[in-house]
Amino acid sequence: MDIRVPTLGESVSEATVATWFKKVGDPVKVDEMLCELETDKVTVEVPATAAGVLSEIVAKEGETVGVDALLATIDERADAKPAAAKAAKPARPLQETAGKAAPADAESAPAHEQSIEIMKHYKEQADVSHPDNLANGTLQLNSVYQAGKIAMQVQYHEFAASIEDEKTSAAAGGKTAYAPCPKGEASWIKNGGPAVNGCNCGIGGIGINGNASEDLKRAAYIFAIYSVSKNNQLAVLKGLGGTPTRKSVIADPEVQKARKRPTNMPNALTFDAVYDYGIKDPHFVLGPKIPNSNEYHQIMATEAQKLAAGQITAEECCANIKQQLDDLHDL
Protein backbone atom coordinates (compact mmCIF):
# COMPACT_ATOMS: atom_id res chain seq x y z
CA MET A 1 0.00 0.00 0.00
CA ASP A 2 1.43 3.36 -1.08
CA ILE A 3 1.18 6.32 1.28
CA ARG A 4 1.06 9.57 -0.68
CA VAL A 5 0.93 13.29 0.05
CA PRO A 6 -2.74 14.33 0.46
CA THR A 7 -4.31 17.52 -0.82
CA LEU A 8 -2.67 20.35 1.09
CA GLY A 9 -5.25 23.08 0.68
CA GLU A 10 -6.08 25.82 -1.76
CA SER A 11 -3.06 27.17 -3.69
CA VAL A 12 -0.65 24.94 -1.72
CA SER A 13 1.34 22.51 -3.87
CA GLU A 14 4.32 21.56 -1.70
CA ALA A 15 5.08 20.63 1.88
CA THR A 16 8.07 19.69 4.01
CA VAL A 17 8.21 16.34 5.80
CA ALA A 18 8.47 17.52 9.40
CA THR A 19 8.33 14.35 11.51
CA TRP A 20 8.01 10.62 11.08
CA PHE A 21 6.22 8.97 14.00
CA LYS A 22 7.05 5.47 12.77
CA LYS A 23 10.27 3.74 11.69
CA VAL A 24 10.75 1.16 8.96
CA GLY A 25 9.72 -2.20 10.40
CA ASP A 26 7.17 -0.77 12.83
CA PRO A 27 3.67 -2.30 12.82
CA VAL A 28 0.92 0.19 11.96
CA LYS A 29 -2.85 0.23 12.33
CA VAL A 30 -5.42 1.77 10.00
CA ASP A 31 -5.70 5.52 10.69
CA GLU A 32 -2.60 5.47 12.92
CA MET A 33 -0.55 8.61 12.37
CA LEU A 34 2.57 8.03 10.25
CA CYS A 35 4.06 11.46 9.67
CA GLU A 36 3.46 15.19 9.78
CA LEU A 37 3.85 17.59 6.85
CA GLU A 38 4.29 21.33 7.16
CA THR A 39 3.43 24.11 4.71
CA ASP A 40 3.53 27.87 5.15
CA LYS A 41 -0.20 27.73 5.93
CA VAL A 42 -0.98 24.49 7.72
CA THR A 43 0.36 21.33 9.35
CA VAL A 44 -1.01 18.13 7.78
CA GLU A 45 -1.08 14.76 9.53
CA VAL A 46 -0.82 11.69 7.30
CA PRO A 47 -2.47 8.51 8.63
CA ALA A 48 -1.98 4.91 7.55
CA THR A 49 -4.61 3.78 5.05
CA ALA A 50 -3.97 0.09 5.73
CA ALA A 51 -2.73 -2.13 8.54
CA GLY A 52 0.61 -3.91 8.25
CA VAL A 53 4.27 -3.04 8.64
CA LEU A 54 5.95 0.14 7.44
CA SER A 55 8.26 -1.33 4.83
CA GLU A 56 9.85 1.79 3.31
CA ILE A 57 10.13 5.51 3.98
CA VAL A 58 10.67 7.26 0.66
CA ALA A 59 10.57 10.92 1.75
CA LYS A 60 12.88 11.64 4.68
CA GLU A 61 12.42 14.36 7.30
CA GLY A 62 13.30 17.77 5.88
CA GLU A 63 12.56 16.83 2.27
CA THR A 64 10.12 18.84 0.15
CA VAL A 65 7.29 16.86 -1.45
CA GLY A 66 4.45 17.71 -3.81
CA VAL A 67 0.81 16.64 -3.76
CA ASP A 68 0.42 12.89 -4.45
CA ALA A 69 4.18 12.27 -4.04
CA LEU A 70 5.09 8.89 -2.57
CA LEU A 71 5.90 9.16 1.13
CA ALA A 72 6.16 5.52 2.20
CA THR A 73 4.85 2.02 1.64
CA ILE A 74 3.08 -0.41 3.96
CA ASP A 75 3.42 -4.17 3.58
CA GLU A 76 -0.09 -5.46 4.26
CA ARG A 77 1.10 -9.07 4.12
CA ALA A 78 3.66 -8.58 6.87
CA ASP A 79 3.02 -9.86 10.37
CA ALA A 80 1.20 -7.16 12.31
CA LYS A 81 -0.70 -9.32 14.77
CA PRO A 82 -1.08 -6.74 17.56
CA ALA A 83 -2.70 -4.27 15.18
CA ALA A 84 -4.86 -6.94 13.56
CA ALA A 85 -6.05 -8.23 16.92
CA LYS A 86 -7.20 -4.82 17.98
CA ALA A 87 -8.79 -3.99 14.64
CA ALA A 88 -10.78 -7.24 14.80
CA LYS A 89 -12.44 -6.30 18.10
CA PRO A 90 -16.12 -5.51 17.31
CA ALA A 91 -17.50 -2.16 18.33
CA ARG A 92 -19.98 -2.50 21.20
CA PRO A 93 -22.91 -0.14 21.70
CA LEU A 94 -22.28 2.24 24.56
CA GLN A 95 -25.38 0.97 26.32
CA GLU A 96 -23.83 -2.52 26.57
CA THR A 97 -20.62 -1.28 28.20
CA ALA A 98 -21.94 1.37 30.58
CA GLY A 99 -22.19 0.20 34.18
CA LYS A 100 -21.61 -3.54 33.64
CA ALA A 101 -17.94 -4.22 34.29
CA ALA A 102 -17.26 -2.55 37.65
CA PRO A 103 -18.60 0.16 39.96
CA ALA A 104 -16.28 2.66 38.25
CA ASP A 105 -18.13 2.04 34.99
CA ALA A 106 -21.44 2.71 36.71
CA GLU A 107 -20.16 6.07 37.88
CA SER A 108 -19.10 6.97 34.35
CA ALA A 109 -22.50 6.15 32.79
CA PRO A 110 -23.70 9.78 33.04
CA ALA A 111 -20.54 10.81 31.17
CA HIS A 112 -21.57 8.47 28.34
CA GLU A 113 -25.04 10.01 28.26
CA GLN A 114 -23.53 13.50 28.29
CA SER A 115 -21.24 12.67 25.36
CA ILE A 116 -24.15 11.31 23.32
CA GLU A 117 -26.29 14.36 24.11
CA ILE A 118 -23.57 16.78 23.00
CA MET A 119 -22.92 14.79 19.82
CA LYS A 120 -26.61 15.02 18.94
CA HIS A 121 -26.46 18.80 19.20
CA TYR A 122 -23.19 18.84 17.27
CA LYS A 123 -25.01 17.06 14.43
CA GLU A 124 -27.87 19.58 14.57
CA GLN A 125 -25.41 22.46 14.16
CA ALA A 126 -23.56 20.65 11.39
CA ASP A 127 -26.82 20.29 9.47
CA VAL A 128 -27.25 24.07 9.16
CA SER A 129 -23.58 24.86 8.57
CA HIS A 130 -21.70 25.12 5.28
CA PRO A 131 -20.72 21.68 3.82
CA ASP A 132 -17.02 22.53 4.17
CA ASN A 133 -17.54 22.09 7.91
CA LEU A 134 -17.32 18.36 7.22
CA ALA A 135 -13.57 18.83 6.78
CA ASN A 136 -13.48 19.82 10.47
CA GLY A 137 -10.22 21.70 9.92
CA THR A 138 -9.64 25.18 11.29
CA LEU A 139 -8.35 26.50 7.96
CA GLN A 140 -11.34 25.23 6.00
CA LEU A 141 -13.76 26.56 8.62
CA ASN A 142 -12.03 29.91 8.63
CA SER A 143 -12.36 30.10 4.83
CA VAL A 144 -16.10 29.38 5.15
CA TYR A 145 -16.52 32.24 7.60
CA GLN A 146 -14.48 34.65 5.50
CA ALA A 147 -16.82 33.87 2.60
CA GLY A 148 -19.78 34.96 4.73
CA LYS A 149 -21.22 31.46 5.23
CA ILE A 150 -22.21 29.66 8.45
CA ALA A 151 -19.13 28.10 10.03
CA MET A 152 -18.85 26.01 13.17
CA GLN A 153 -15.84 25.75 15.50
CA VAL A 154 -13.81 28.61 14.09
CA GLN A 155 -10.81 29.22 16.36
CA TYR A 156 -11.15 32.94 15.84
CA HIS A 157 -8.50 33.83 18.41
CA GLU A 158 -5.91 32.27 16.11
CA PHE A 159 -7.28 33.51 12.79
CA ALA A 160 -8.63 37.00 13.43
CA ALA A 161 -5.79 38.47 11.37
CA SER A 162 -7.17 36.81 8.22
CA ILE A 163 -10.81 37.46 9.19
CA GLU A 164 -10.01 41.19 9.40
CA ASP A 165 -8.22 41.30 6.04
CA GLU A 166 -10.58 43.36 3.83
CA LYS A 167 -8.88 42.05 0.66
CA THR A 168 -9.90 38.43 1.31
CA SER A 169 -12.69 38.42 3.89
CA ALA A 170 -16.34 39.41 3.63
CA ALA A 171 -16.38 39.51 7.43
CA ALA A 172 -13.79 42.30 7.72
CA GLY A 173 -14.22 46.02 8.35
CA GLY A 174 -15.72 45.82 11.83
CA LYS A 175 -18.42 43.30 10.85
CA THR A 176 -17.07 40.65 13.23
CA ALA A 177 -17.30 40.76 17.01
CA TYR A 178 -15.36 38.41 19.26
CA ALA A 179 -17.08 36.94 22.30
CA PRO A 180 -17.19 33.71 24.34
CA CYS A 181 -19.31 30.93 22.86
CA PRO A 182 -22.90 30.61 24.12
CA LYS A 183 -23.22 28.39 27.16
CA GLY A 184 -25.97 26.27 25.65
CA GLU A 185 -29.18 24.92 27.12
CA ALA A 186 -29.18 23.90 30.78
CA SER A 187 -31.26 20.86 29.76
CA TRP A 188 -28.22 19.56 27.85
CA ILE A 189 -26.35 19.02 31.13
CA LYS A 190 -27.18 15.52 32.37
CA ASN A 191 -25.86 15.88 35.94
CA GLY A 192 -27.74 19.11 36.57
CA GLY A 193 -24.58 21.18 37.00
CA PRO A 194 -24.17 24.80 35.92
CA ALA A 195 -23.57 25.72 32.29
CA VAL A 196 -20.08 27.07 31.58
CA ASN A 197 -18.13 28.09 28.51
CA GLY A 198 -16.04 24.99 28.00
CA CYS A 199 -12.47 25.41 26.78
CA ASN A 200 -10.22 22.34 26.91
CA CYS A 201 -6.64 22.69 25.81
CA GLY A 202 -3.16 21.65 26.74
CA ILE A 203 -3.31 18.01 25.67
CA GLY A 204 -0.41 18.46 23.28
CA GLY A 205 2.94 20.14 23.59
CA ILE A 206 6.39 20.52 22.12
CA GLY A 207 8.08 17.16 21.65
CA ILE A 208 11.62 16.20 20.68
CA ASN A 209 12.19 12.95 18.81
CA GLY A 210 13.99 10.54 21.12
CA ASN A 211 15.43 8.70 18.11
CA ALA A 212 17.23 11.81 16.84
CA SER A 213 20.94 12.38 17.29
CA GLU A 214 22.16 14.33 20.32
CA ASP A 215 23.03 17.30 18.12
CA LEU A 216 19.52 17.36 16.63
CA LYS A 217 17.98 17.10 20.09
CA ARG A 218 20.01 20.06 21.31
CA ALA A 219 19.12 22.05 18.20
CA ALA A 220 15.44 21.22 18.66
CA TYR A 221 15.57 22.35 22.29
CA ILE A 222 17.16 25.66 21.34
CA PHE A 223 14.59 26.18 18.58
CA ALA A 224 11.72 25.39 20.97
CA ILE A 225 12.92 28.12 23.32
CA TYR A 226 13.37 30.57 20.45
CA SER A 227 9.97 29.82 18.90
CA VAL A 228 8.08 30.84 22.04
CA SER A 229 10.29 33.79 22.98
CA LYS A 230 8.63 37.15 23.64
CA ASN A 231 10.20 38.86 20.63
CA ASN A 232 9.18 36.06 18.30
CA GLN A 233 5.59 35.84 19.60
CA LEU A 234 5.24 39.61 19.32
CA ALA A 235 6.52 39.52 15.72
CA VAL A 236 4.05 36.75 14.84
CA LEU A 237 1.18 38.68 16.44
CA LYS A 238 2.00 41.70 14.29
CA GLY A 239 2.12 39.58 11.14
CA LEU A 240 0.26 36.27 10.80
CA GLY A 241 -1.68 36.64 14.04
CA GLY A 242 -1.25 33.64 16.29
CA THR A 243 -2.05 33.22 19.96
CA PRO A 244 0.65 34.45 22.37
CA THR A 245 1.33 32.23 25.37
CA ARG A 246 3.61 34.64 27.26
CA LYS A 247 2.02 37.09 29.69
CA SER A 248 4.78 39.56 28.89
CA VAL A 249 3.46 39.76 25.31
CA ILE A 250 -0.13 40.32 26.37
CA ALA A 251 0.97 42.97 28.89
CA ASP A 252 3.09 44.85 26.33
CA PRO A 253 1.75 48.46 26.00
CA GLU A 254 1.66 48.18 22.21
CA VAL A 255 -0.42 44.99 22.44
CA GLN A 256 -2.77 46.51 25.02
CA LYS A 257 -3.43 49.44 22.70
CA ALA A 258 -4.08 47.04 19.80
CA ARG A 259 -7.00 45.42 21.65
CA LYS A 260 -9.27 48.23 20.42
CA ARG A 261 -10.10 49.27 16.85
CA PRO A 262 -8.36 50.55 14.79
CA THR A 263 -5.60 48.01 15.32
CA ASN A 264 -2.45 46.76 13.64
CA MET A 265 -2.75 43.43 15.49
CA PRO A 266 -6.24 42.03 14.71
CA ASN A 267 -5.76 38.94 16.88
CA ALA A 268 -5.52 41.24 19.91
CA LEU A 269 -9.21 42.06 19.37
CA THR A 270 -10.00 38.57 20.69
CA PHE A 271 -8.13 38.91 23.98
CA ASP A 272 -11.14 40.22 25.95
CA ALA A 273 -13.04 37.01 25.21
CA VAL A 274 -10.12 34.60 25.27
CA TYR A 275 -7.63 35.74 27.90
CA ASP A 276 -9.85 37.83 30.18
CA TYR A 277 -12.70 35.33 30.26
CA GLY A 278 -12.41 32.11 28.27
CA ILE A 279 -9.28 30.62 29.83
CA LYS A 280 -10.21 31.39 33.42
CA ASP A 281 -11.92 29.11 35.91
CA PRO A 282 -14.57 27.67 35.61
CA HIS A 283 -14.63 27.98 31.82
CA PHE A 284 -11.21 26.51 31.22
CA VAL A 285 -10.04 22.92 31.66
CA LEU A 286 -6.38 22.07 31.21
CA GLY A 287 -6.49 18.62 29.67
CA PRO A 288 -4.05 15.86 30.60
CA LYS A 289 -1.03 15.35 28.37
CA ILE A 290 -1.86 12.53 25.97
CA PRO A 291 1.10 10.47 24.70
CA ASN A 292 -0.65 9.72 21.40
CA SER A 293 -2.22 13.14 20.89
CA ASN A 294 -1.98 12.99 17.09
CA GLU A 295 -3.85 9.70 17.01
CA TYR A 296 -6.37 11.09 19.54
CA HIS A 297 -7.14 14.07 17.30
CA GLN A 298 -7.41 11.82 14.25
CA ILE A 299 -9.90 9.50 15.97
CA MET A 300 -12.04 12.38 17.19
CA ALA A 301 -12.02 14.17 13.82
CA THR A 302 -12.77 11.03 11.79
CA GLU A 303 -15.74 9.95 13.88
CA ALA A 304 -17.12 13.50 14.14
CA GLN A 305 -16.93 13.78 10.34
CA LYS A 306 -18.87 10.52 9.95
CA LEU A 307 -21.53 11.84 12.32
CA ALA A 308 -21.79 15.19 10.55
CA ALA A 309 -22.09 13.37 7.19
CA GLY A 310 -24.97 11.25 8.52
CA GLN A 311 -23.04 7.97 8.22
CA ILE A 312 -23.40 7.07 11.91
CA THR A 313 -25.60 8.06 14.86
CA ALA A 314 -24.46 10.00 17.92
CA GLU A 315 -24.55 6.77 19.94
CA GLU A 316 -22.39 4.96 17.39
CA CYS A 317 -20.00 7.92 17.20
CA CYS A 318 -19.39 7.90 20.96
CA ALA A 319 -19.07 4.12 21.06
CA ASN A 320 -16.52 4.17 18.22
CA ILE A 321 -14.48 6.90 19.90
CA LYS A 322 -14.50 5.08 23.23
CA GLN A 323 -13.39 1.77 21.74
CA GLN A 324 -10.61 3.31 19.64
CA LEU A 325 -9.28 5.36 22.56
CA ASP A 326 -9.38 2.28 24.79
CA ASP A 327 -7.47 0.34 22.13
CA LEU A 328 -4.99 3.20 21.72
CA HIS A 329 -4.14 3.07 25.41
CA ASP A 330 -4.40 -0.73 25.78
CA LEU A 331 -7.42 -0.53 28.09
Image (cartoon, grey):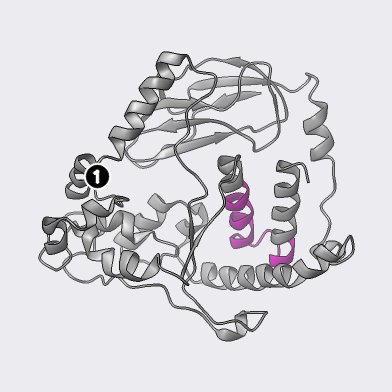
Magenta span main SS: helix
Q: Secondary structure at mark 1?
A: helix
Estimate the x, y position of residue 2 in percent, counting from the top left: 61, 23
Camera sees residue 164? no
At 69% from the left edge and 66% from the top edge, which residue is drawn?
A: 314
- Give residue 191's quadrant in the image: bottom right
Q: Position of residue 127 (x, y in %)?
A: 54, 69
Q: Residue at x 46, y 70 (%)?
A: 283
What are the residue bounds of the magenta stretch?
Answer: 299-316
- Categorize mark 1 by other alpha carbons within 10 Å: few (<14), some (14-19), many (20+): many
Q: Is residue 204 above or below residue 104?
A: above
Image point (16%, 62%), residue name: 256
Location of residue 216 by image quarter:
top left
- Residue 102 or 237: which is nearer the viewer? 102
* x and y percentages locating residue 268 in the rendered image: 22, 60
Quick one: 159 or 64, which is closer to the camera? 159
Residue at the image position 33 percent from the left and 40 percent from the top = 41
On the image, numbered disc 1 is attached to which residue?
233
* For residue 32, above or below residue 277: above
| Quadrant housing the N terminus | top right
Whether residue 75 appears in this view of the structure is yes
Q: Is residue 175 above or below residue 305?
A: below
Asked if residue 45 lies in the magenta stretch, the reply is no
